[in-house]
Image (tube, grey):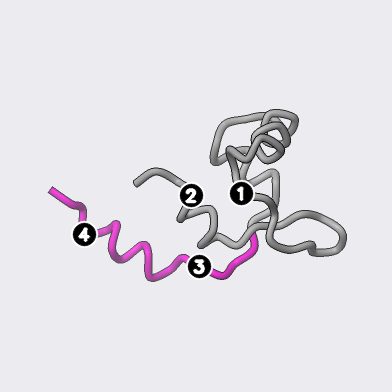
Amino acid sequence: MKNLNDDHLALFIDANRLVRKPEIQRLLGVSRSTLGRRIKAGQFPSPSLLQSGRPCWLFKDIQAWLPH
């Protein structure tokens, strides 16, 4: 049975918000070097944008990559 709170939570997550590397590391439970290797190997999407010289991803890109 699907939790109704899951649907409501989606309303509060801005799909276009920027996600930085430390947040992705916490989400995936990996180190900075492991994340870098996965990006280089094509196992994780490359950053979409740079903000103040730092790599950022759009939340919707990360969400699309995550298994459902």
The correct choice, above or below, for 37 with respect to 60 in the image is above
Q: Position of residue 6 (x, y in %)?
A: 29, 57
Residue annotated with mark 3: 15
Q: Which residue is mark 1?
A: 45
State which mark lies toward you, 2 or 4. Answer: 2
Location of residue 38 in the rendering, given as x and y in whole percent from the top left corner: 65, 34
Gap between marks 4 and 1 measured at Cα: 30 Å
Residue at screen point 21% across, 59% down: 4
Q: Tell me the residue that label 4 is attached to.
A: 4
Q: Which residues are magenta?
A: 1-18
Q: Are marks 2 and 1 in contact (CB under 8 Å)?
A: yes
Q: Write the residue at 68% across / 61% down.
A: 48
In the displayed structure image, the side of residue 13 where residue 35 appears, left or right: right
Residue 40: name its quadrant: top right
Residue shown at 67% from the left, 40% from the top = 39
* 54 sits to left or right of 36: right
